[in-house]
Amino acid sequence: MNNDLSRRGFVKGVAAAGAGTAVARYARVAGWMAAGAAPAVLSAAEAKPALLGGTPARRGAFPAWPVYGAPEEEALRGVLRSGAWFRGAGKKVAEFEAAYAKLTGARHCIATANGTSALFGAMGALEIGPGDEVVLPPYTFIATLNVILLNYALPVFVDSDPATFQLDATKLDAALTERTTAIIPVHLGGNVADLDAILAAAGKRGVPVIEDACQAPLAEWRGRKVGTLGRTGCFSFQASKNLNSGEGGAVITDDDELAEKVYAFHNNNRARKVSGYNFSYRGTRGANLRLAEWQGAMLLAQMTRLEQQSKVREQNAQYLSSRLREIPGILPAQSYAGCTRNAYHLYMFRFDREKFGGGLTRAGFMKALSAEGVPCSSGYTPLNKEGFLKEVLASKAYRRIYPAAVLNEWEERNRCPANDRLCEEAVWLTHPMLLGPRSDMDEIVAAVRKIHTHAAQLAKA
Ligand SMILES: *Cc1c(COP(=O)(O)O)cnc(C)c1O
């Protein structure tokens, strides 16, 4: 494992050497070797952008999501006709838990109502509460923050690494104090956070790591599925996610004791093997965070598609990155060297305005890209700067729990300048866009090339 100093040295090396240089911190970036599509793409670049009256680079729709068929219909009909609609009566949720534990290589899996309740259950079982500091990245879905606030813990943001869109683990150590009781790295976009560095920093202080793997089913770190490297891993099966049952979630862990606590927490404090009203209480606090049988059956059916879909996403995304990297100012998210599989929940890149040229802004670029038939989004805004968060920290409860000095210093302590810039440069494509044929990727590349060739005209349009 790299020590902190050599890691910092590498980061400086990356900055000095510029992007594209193979260094130990990030995975090597392969150029695309097939000779195939280049000429067609280059001539397409000369075509007139749709915004300037040309023909869109892409006219068809991208693949629809969710994907379903006979297995899902049978699964739902089976639960309907069984009359066993909740986990206490049926077996589908338990079957899914066993299958998901097997898939990830975890000893235990507890299915939950959604990803938020998976995180809430993990935190409840770890007894995180008022006065605790919990570390998270500022570049994440709001639920990662909400579960910290629900427990009246103090969120501590660690800046982002713009190269990967993940928490910058070189800045983690400085954020930890004797009050830190959990670190929640997020495997954002299906890419993987720098788990070597995060687990090392956490291990030194004995702080549990809760992996927020809600966007990263099947992603791997050094050949192991994410969610199994921390104390617990949390997943979401909400409709937009790579594995979905409309709503749904799961906590995985290898810790027997913790698994029973998560189970009890998600089942109103009741321990496993409930029979009639002869249940036993376990743990201190709890709620009903259970998954329904419909969802368990649905997840079992959707899981039969997951590996194949992930392979297609991976192949398309890698190809897309190799082609987009050839265009100045388009910087696809890199992975750390330890990331052996990326789940590509999002296809993320940075739009570097200076390098792209022509005076085109990100907003102008995105408008032109959408006009070419390639829908895109600017992604998250800085979570650490959200107005509602300031209100929570100024609330009666927080003022009662935390000394005034802690709350007054909070804003200064939680500045994330690299993330502020990342939020201004990011562009996202959604994962279903990666599920079609490779020619879809060529059309995306053609659209971006066209915009690059005509950037100056588009900037004036
Ligand atoms: C989706 C998501 C969650 C929450 O999951 P829900 O199922 O929507 O409650 C938490 N964290 C991240 C990073 C997510 O993407």
Image (cartoon, helix red, strand yellow):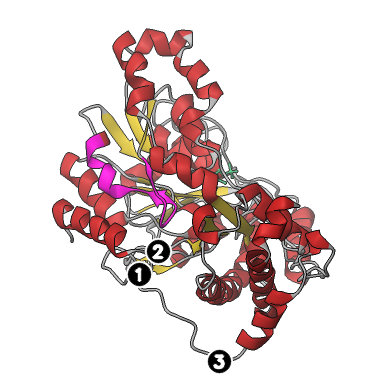
Which kind of residue does numbered mark 3 sit on?
Ala
Is tag 3's residue or tag 2's residue first in the polypeptide sequence? 3
- In-image side of 423 versus 13 (left or right): right
| 1 and 2 marks in contact (CB < 8 Å) | yes
Residue holding disc 1? 27
Mark 2 residue element: loop
Q: Quadrant of ligand 1?
A: top right
Q: Which mark is residue 35?
A: 3
Foreground: 437 or 306? 437
Q: Quadrant of residue 411?
A: top left
Residue 326 in picture, x, y percent from top left: 51, 73
- At x 44% / y 42%, what residue is drawn? 419
Image position of 154 with respect to 303: above or below = above
Residue range highlighted in magenta: 159-174
Q: Do we see residue 279 in this rendering?
A: no
Foreground: 67 or 414? 414
Quick check: is 164 in the magenta stretch?
Answer: yes
Which kind of residue does numbered mark 1 sit on?
Ala
Image position of 219 with respect to 282: above or below = below
